[in-house]
Amino acid sequence: MSSTPPSASPPAHGLNLAQQEAVNYMHGPCLVLAGAGSGKTRVITHKIGRLIQAGLPPQEIAAITFTNKAAAEMRERAKKLIGQPARGVLICTFHALGVRMLRQDGEVLGLKKQFSILDSDDVTSILKDAGGSTDAATARQWQWTISAWKNSGLNAAQAEAQAATDEDRLVARVMARYEERLTAYQSVDFDDLIGLPLKLLREHDAVRDKWQASMGHVLVDEYQDTNATQYEVLKLLVGARGRFTAVGDDDQSIYGWRGATLDNLKKLPLDYPQLKVVKLEQNYRSTSAILRAAN
């Protein structure tokens, strides 16, 4: 990483050469490897503007990130850079995208449009009932295990089939009863907002074709924080054309506790041999002393 002092700023036109390369590559899959302070959000917002300039309708562009705060910041920056057309771009979290997909097409999975989204306390309460327990700590332990299975793409039957211990088999059976209750209550939990959209895209061709047609280009921020299920959703959204830009830092993943895996960075060039890789190595935030120590 370059040791440019924090007072330095990008060139007058707003982008350095590597950033320009990432922004101007629009016709296939692109991975932008970028450390903190190297202008990741700048690349995403400028690329949104470049796609619109090239004729892609704003409503066919999606920018996905991990927190509501990050999505709000990106929306604001896109609005300042692009103006009115930015309003048409879908800028949201993975989970907000999942809600949108399920509200539109969840009926093919038996979900009514007015399904409810459970918070953590609701989940704990239902798990206590499903497992015949009055102990909240036990129910929370089940909740973490079930969440990990869901983020790995497993349902209750699959979890039980691969269970290595009696405890895991017990939790898998609790998970099966929990799934039955969610269906009866017309409810989903936080993990379902990724898992059920994946089921939609995998098992329903018409739904998958519709969403792929609506996604002219997908941009994913903090790509290193995706888990296995989110990566599968991304692949099915972009289809064989692979029109996406993934921006991530291969040295930094903060969501390992919920299944985030750097394996997704390694899978990209295997799944997309035509992948364009751009490295942002200019740092605009840290002093040269900090960078020398970090390197």
Image: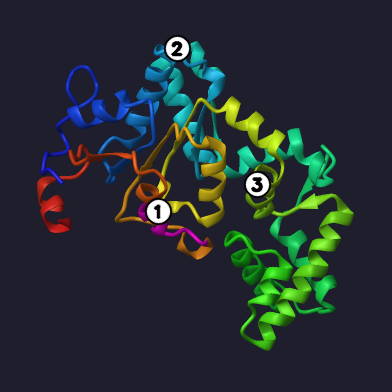
For badge 3, the amino acid type reads Arg
The percent coordinates of residue 151 (x first, y second) are 59, 60
Residue under circle 2? 55
Q: Which secondary structure, mark 2?
A: loop
Could you tell me residue 243's position as x and y percent? 44, 31
Q: Magenta span covers which residues?
A: 259-266
- In the image, 30 versus 288, the foreground residue is 30
Nearest to the observer: residue 77 or residue 184: 184
Front residue (pair 205, 1): 205
| Number of marks drawn | 3
Mark 2 vs mark 3: which is more N-terminal? 2
User: Which of the 4 image quadrants contains residue 54?
Assistant: top left
Question: Tag 3's secondary structure?
Answer: helix
Which label is found at residue 267? 1
Q: Is residue 151 magenta?
A: no
The nearer-to-camera label among 2 and 3 is 3
Q: Residue at x 76, y 79 (%)?
A: 135
Instruction: Determine which of the numbered discs, if any, sits on residue 202 in the image.
Output: 3
Instruction: Check disc 2 and give the amino acid type.
Output: Gly
Image coordinates of residue 24 in percent, x first then y, are 30, 23
